[in-house]
Image (cartoon, rainbow, N blue to C red):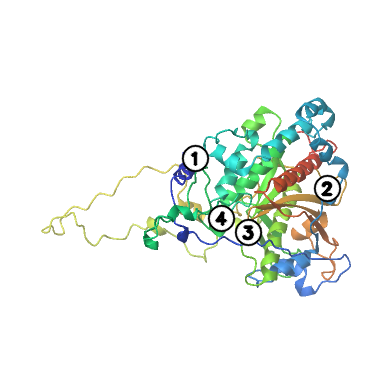
Amino acid sequence: MFAGIPALANAQRLHDRVDPADIPPPTPIALPRYQPFAQDGTPVQPSESLSALLSTTGRRPAAIASIALSAIGLDLKADVDVQQLIPDPSFIPDFARWDQMTLEQAQDANTSTQRPLNTGKLSPGCHVYLERKMELSSVNEEAFRTVRRIQAPMGKIAPRLGNAWEFFRCLEQLTIYWDDPTKVPSLPPSPEIFAGDDAAEPSEKPATAAGPDANGSIGRTQAGHQMPAGLRHSLVATFVKLVAYDFGCSASPSKTEPRLQLRSPSNSRASPRKSYCPSRCQFVFKNPQNREAFRHGHIYGPVAAISCRPETNFTKPSLEAAQSMDLAREVIAALITAQHRAREGKEEERFGQGQWWTTRPRWGGGPGGPIGREIQNDEIAGDKDLPPDAGDDAPAPAPPTKRPRRGMTMYDNYRMVRPPAATWDRKAKYMSIGKQTGADYDDIFLVSCLFHHVSVLRVRVPTRLLEVLDGAPEPDPTHRSWGKMQAWRTPWYDLFETKDRLEAMRLIWSVMAYQMREDANAAQA
C-alpha cells in the first residue's frame, strides 16, 4: 500500500530547487584494498587459532577482523580476470565473438550458442546477450529522462530500456546522493547576462539553485553517506536479476536473518556455547520449475550471494582495522552461503533440543505467580470522573471490556521453556547447486557492492572448515587442518559507467553459466 510513496517523493523533487550552499560536499570514494596472504603449513599462535576464537565470547578489540581472517587462513588474489574467477573456463561464453554480431546474425546463431542447464532448459544465447547489452548501453541521462517520464528533446528518440528499466530507475535514485561521472558538466552562465546590471548590487543579482535544468537533469542534493542502504540493495539485486532470470534464478532477501552459526569445540572443558554473526546479505535462488511449488513460494539453493555494505569511511579507527572489517563482512556472507548449501539432505537440529535447560522450568524454586499487567492488586488512588462529594460509597468503575485473545499472551509465551527459535527457512530446499562432484570444498560466488561499485568474488570454502565452525575438534590448534581458504576478487566496476556495467554483466553471466550447468550435482526441481 506504500509502494507509491517513493515515486511521489521522486516526482516532487523534480520541482524542488535547492540552494547550492545547502548541498553538502560529495562523499569521497576510496575502495578498500586489504589483501591477506596465507600458506598451508604456516603455524598459528594458540591464542589466535580458530578453536580459541570459538571458545571465547564477548566483545573483541577492533583488530578481531584481521585475527579472524588469519585464523581461517584466507588467501586473497585481487584484480583477477574472468578466466581466473571461473573454475572451468570452458563454460565462459565467447563474448568477443558475440559482440561482433548483429541482431540478425545473433538470432540465426542463437540456438548454437545455448547450453543445457540443470533445470532441464537451455541457457540464454547470444541474441539475449545482445539485447541486454543494448539495454544497459543506454546513456544515463537519456535513460533517466525515460524513467522520469520526460519527453525526449527535439530530434532525438527515447531509448528503449526494456528489461533494464527497473535498473535505471534504481540508478536514477542514486543521483540524489552521488555525482554521475558520465554527466556532462553544465556551462556557467554567460557574463553578458549581467552586462546591463552593473549598477546593481551583487546581492540583488539572481541566485542560482540546484534543480532540474532545461533538459530535465537533476544534480546531487545530499551526501553519499546519507543514502539509505535499501537503495543499494535494490540496485544490485535488480542488476543481478537481468542475467539470473534467463538462467531460471532470481535474487531476493532471505525470509530468515542470515546468520553465520558458530559453535565451541566439542572437546572444550567449558560448557558448550553457540553464537552467530548476522549479515545483511541476499541470495540468488533457483526458481521452481512447476507451478504448484512456485505458488507455495518454494526456492532452491542458494546459487550465489549478494553483499552490499553502507560503509563509506575505511580509515577509522585505523586503515587496517576498517578495511579488514569490510573484508570480514564479505567472508561472513560467503561462509553463510556455504553453510546453507551444506544443509542439503539434512534436517535442522535446534541448539539445546532435548536438554534439561530447554524442557524444565527453573525459577529458583519459587512458586511463581502473576507478572506485569497480570497483577490486579493495584488500586486506583482517585478517579477524576467522580463528583467532588463522592465518598467511600461511590461505585467502583467497571473494568474495560476487551476482546479475548486468540493466541497466547506475551506472558504465557515468556513462561514457556523451549529451545531457541528455528533459523532455517521452511520454504527453502537447501542445495549445493554448481558444486563439483566429490570435491572437499565448495566454490561460493559473491557479488560485493560498495558506494556504487560492484565486484565479484569466488571463495573456496573447505568442508573441513565448516565442520570446525560447527564444533568439530581440532587435533592440533596451531595448524589448520583444512590448509587455507582461497579467494579471488575481480576489479571494482562503477555501475554509472557503461563500459564497467557491461563488464560486470559478463562476469555475472559467466558465473550463472557455470553454476547452472547441466553436469552440476543438483537435483531437478
Q: From what the image shows, is residue 185 above or below residue 292?
A: below
Could you say which quadrant of the image residue 404 lies in?
top left
Mark in the foreground, 3 or 4: 4
> What is the CA distance from the residue labelled 3 to the residue labelled 4?
10 Å
Question: What amino acid type should be assigned to the residue bearing mark 1?
Answer: Ala
First in sequence: mark 1 vs mark 2: 1
**Mark 1 and 3 residues: CB-CB less than 8 Å, in contact?**
no
Q: Is residue 110 above or below residue 449?
A: above
**Label drawn at residue 3:** 1
Q: Label 4: which residue?
A: 417
Tell which tag, 3 or 2, sits nearer the viewer. Answer: 2
Q: CA distance from mark 1 to mark 3?
A: 48 Å
Gap in angstroms between the C-alphas marked 2 and 4: 48 Å
Q: Nearer the viewer, residue 493 or 183?
A: 183
Classify mark 2: helix, strand or loop: loop
Look at mark 3 in the image and give the residue it sits on. 356
